[in-house]
Image (spheres, grey):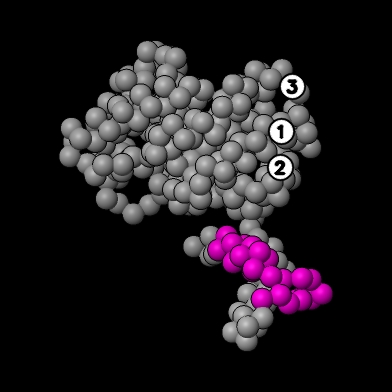
Amino acid sequence: MKPVRVALFAPGINTKVMSKALVAGVDAVILDLEDSVPIASKAEARSLVTTVIDGLAATPGPAIFVRVNSTATSYLADDLAAVVRPGLDAVMLPKAESIEDVQQTAAAIEHRETALGMKPGSVEIILQIESALGVHRCFDLIKASPRVTATCLGGGRDGDLQTDLGCSWSIEGTELLYARSKLLLDTRAAGSHVLPLDGVFSDLNDEAGLIADTRLSARLGYVGRTTIHPKQTAPVRQAYAVPEAEVTYYRKVVSEFEAKEKQGIAAITVDGKLVDYAMFQRAKRVLALANLDQR
């Protein structure tokens, strides 16, 4: 999956909100069939979402994800039958805990792709990790199917993960730090093709808190997160952006190391800091991240 800075949720039952999300300048829009949709409105939301996807097929714009209902519900089969179609980039599977559930979801997607004549593997899977068991099994869940190309932490305040752990929540992030770090570690260990996404920050009136939490997310190693309102887009991009001082330094690292490497030297100092191949690779990675902010 391509790197994502901002993935914006939009309730699948609200056509107006979905339309606004699609032009909000985000990298991906998550059309939601799960928690933001009343039980009595599931079928209607499913129909609205499929109409949106059909209207976007082969149209430039943000990536289109759909959060379906979990495998523990009776809605998942109908969700997948409806939304897996040209124009959909990924299915977000909430409350992921079981290898079998991931594999069955992947099989259902494959069946639908085949029936529609779609390119095999065109619809990816994002695992939303929202429980202690999901955190514990994260690496194995990722490896359950090659369709899994991203994970997303369900770490929003008063959300499922906090409830399951029985922990408190604070802006310092101490209580969920282990879960947040383990998801990142397991996702990175699963391969460079898998993207770790941080979860939502649910207080729409606390921009300073959003920025502080996103900066913590960036320090941990995340490069993007999910959001719940377009007004969170600019602060999140700002907080994830690589500081200009780092860009300047790492450009210098790359330039000077490459020059010395041509002379047969692979260990140098830049601004008093040791640079060898490990630091050189780190510099290139940071500069690649910085390029995300130039798109």
Vertical position of residue 248 compared to residue 189: above or below? below
Residue that mark 1 sits on: 178
Q: Nearer the viewer, mark 3 or mark 1?
A: 1
Question: Which sits in the foreground, 105 or 262?
Answer: 262
As shown in the figure, which amino acid type bears the numbered disc 3? Cys
**In the depicted structure, whether residue 92 falls above or below residue 208:** above
Q: Which residue is drawn at 62% across and 41% down?
A: 185
Image-based side of 88 in relation to 25, left or right? left
**Could you tell me which secondary element the residue under label 2 belongs to?**
helix
Is residue 290 something one can see in this rendering? no
Quote the CA–CA distance across marks 2 and 3. 17 Å
| Residue 214 pos. (x, y %) | 67, 45
What residue would you read off at disc 2? 213
Q: Name the residue under label 3.
A: 167
The residue lying toward the viewer, choosing from 110 and 32, is 110
- Residue count near mark 1 (Cα–Cα under 10 Å), binned few <14, some 14–19, many ≥20: few
Q: Give the image quarter of residue 112.
A: top left
- What span is colored magenta in the figure? 266-290
Whether 278 is among the magenta residues is yes
**First in sequence: mark 2 or mark 1?**
1
Pick out the residue farthest to the front: 264
Q: Which mark is residue 292?
A: none
The one nearer the camera, 126 or 202, is 126
Location of residue 44 (image quadrant): top left
- Mark whose residue sits in front, 2 or 1: 1
